[in-house]
Image (cartoon, helix red, strand yellow):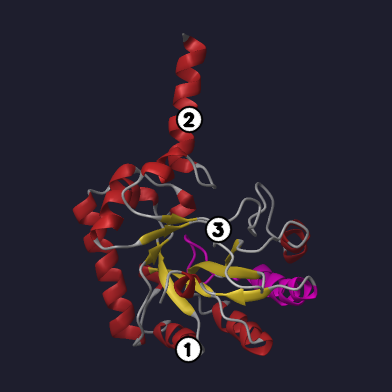
Amino acid sequence: MFIFLAVAFGMVALAHTAPFPFLLDAIAPAPSLWRVSPVGTSPTIYLTFDDGPNPTTTPDLLDVLARERVHATFFLIDRNLTDETAPIVRRMFEEGHAVALHSHTRALMVMSPEQLAETLTAAAGRIRRLAGGEPCPAFRPHAGWRGGSMYAGLARINYTLVGWGWMRWDWNWFHKPTAESAVRRIVPRASPGDIIVFHDGDDKHPRADQRHAVEATAQLIPALRTRGFTFGTICRSLGQ
């Protein structure tokens, strides 16, 4: 009996916290995207960046993307969008990047569907007002923590929950993230449709120097190009 309860508890926990698609995602009322189905003959990778905009790091990251002529998707934290950082987001739109929504807290996981829908709608409205662009209807929850109420809220506003590929990330468990460790992890494992997540910002420190994300991106793009990959945005894959 104890073993059965432990397995059941573990499966419920994974359904809400797993950094990969699991039970809840299959039955949820709103769609989720953890990997993009390949379209056409060009194998495509999707670079995504969380926790910005960050005035310390994001402009340098945009410089790298502009130099490499690559478009990416930025999942922004609402409280990090200020009068100071709005021009950075405006630049994202002007240079053809996609912008979507993120959160600095797991509290959104326990909001009512109505509260979540209102919170995300307000955040999207602030992006339009301060940066002059249209965010796509995509939301990445903090650390991937999700629940039935969250999915119900996303369904109310026709949003898609966006995750990432297994081991396709820059965080390094209990060690400081480095560009080298991220590139070593991702390049050999990359496959068409993969969603890669880096962090140009920090959920606790809005001005943290996330230099590893800039350096990793500068190394990763040519390495993946050598393997024949092209680059796309999440919003375009959702039909926008």
Residue, x 78% and y 72% (percent of image)?
223
Asked whether 91 or 224 is in front, the reply is 224
Whether tag 3 and tag 2 are in contact, CB under 8 A, the answer is no
Q: Position of residue 195 (x, y in %)?
A: 58, 62
Residue, x 50% and y 75% (percent of image)?
54
Q: Quadrant of the C terminus?
A: bottom left
> Which quadrant would residue 196 be assigned to in this image?
bottom right
Mark 1 residue element: helix
Q: Earlier in the sequence, mark 2 or mark 1?
A: 2
Residue type at tag 1: Arg
Q: Tell me if mark 1 has few (under 14), some (14-19) or many (20+) residues whose alpha carbon lies within 10 angstroms of its own.
A: some
Residue type at tag 2: Met
Q: Which residues are magenta?
A: 201-226
Cα distance between the residues tagged 2 and 1: 42 Å
The residue tagged 3 is: 35
Q: What predominant SS class does the magenta segment belong to?
A: helix
Q: Residue furthest front?
A: 40
The residue tagged 1 is: 91
